[in-house]
Amino acid sequence: MTGPAERRAAEREAVELDPEDTKLVTLARGARGRAGAAEGAAVRDEDGRTYAAATVALPSLALTALQAAVAMAVASGAQELEAAVVVGPSPEIDAASRSVAADLGTGLLILAGPDGVARQRTPLTRDR
């Protein structure tokens, strides 16, 4: 159970998002919950289409949630991402997820906790 001090600290850390990015957080939380996975992720491509996925942990295949969401987007024809969200307990986005976001020139990378509160909002420069 969280006390008042912890709630106030979380509110100070919260990052404001626009409605479209909030939708991505909701999609990522849903993917995480359905799969019972450590992380969920959602991405929005250059046409506004969204893709959501959870961590994949199989004996023959391991993907971060963001890698899985990006793979879905690429398989559907996306060539660039406007935004990517990772939802999970980690205090930072892992290197593999950051790399795959960079591969598609993601404009915005967001980290949210399991409660859906965005904790980091990082605009990324595009190399393309």
Image (spheres, rainbow, N blue to C red):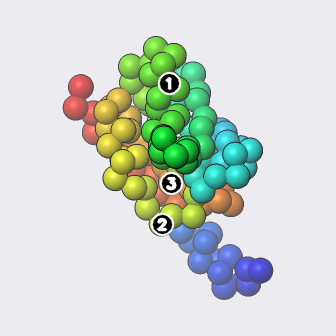
Q: Amino acid at mark 3?
A: Leu
Whole-Å distance between the Cαs marked 3 and 2? 8 Å
Q: What's the residue at 58%, 27% (across, down)? A: 50
Which sits earlier in the primary sequence, circle 3 or circle 2?
2
Give the residue at x 56% y 71%: 12
Classify 10 Å Cα crowding around label 3: few (below 14), some (14-19), many (20 and above).
many
Image height check: is 112 above or below 63?
Answer: below
**Residue holding disc 3:** 111
Quarter of the C terminus within the rendering: top left
Separation of marks 3 and 1 at Cα, in angstroms: 19 Å
Asked where in the image residue 46 lies, by quadrant, the reply is: top left
Q: Position of residue 99 (x, y in %)?
A: 32, 43
Can you identify the residue that label 1 sits on? 73
Q: Quadrant of residue 11?
A: bottom right
**In screen coordinates, is 1 left or right of 98?**
right
- Counting residues from the start of the chain, the first of labels 3 and 1 encountered is 1
Name the foreground residue: 106 vs 53: 53
Of mark 2 and mark 1, the one earlier in the sequence is 1
- Which type of secondary structure does the marked residue at label 3 adopt? strand
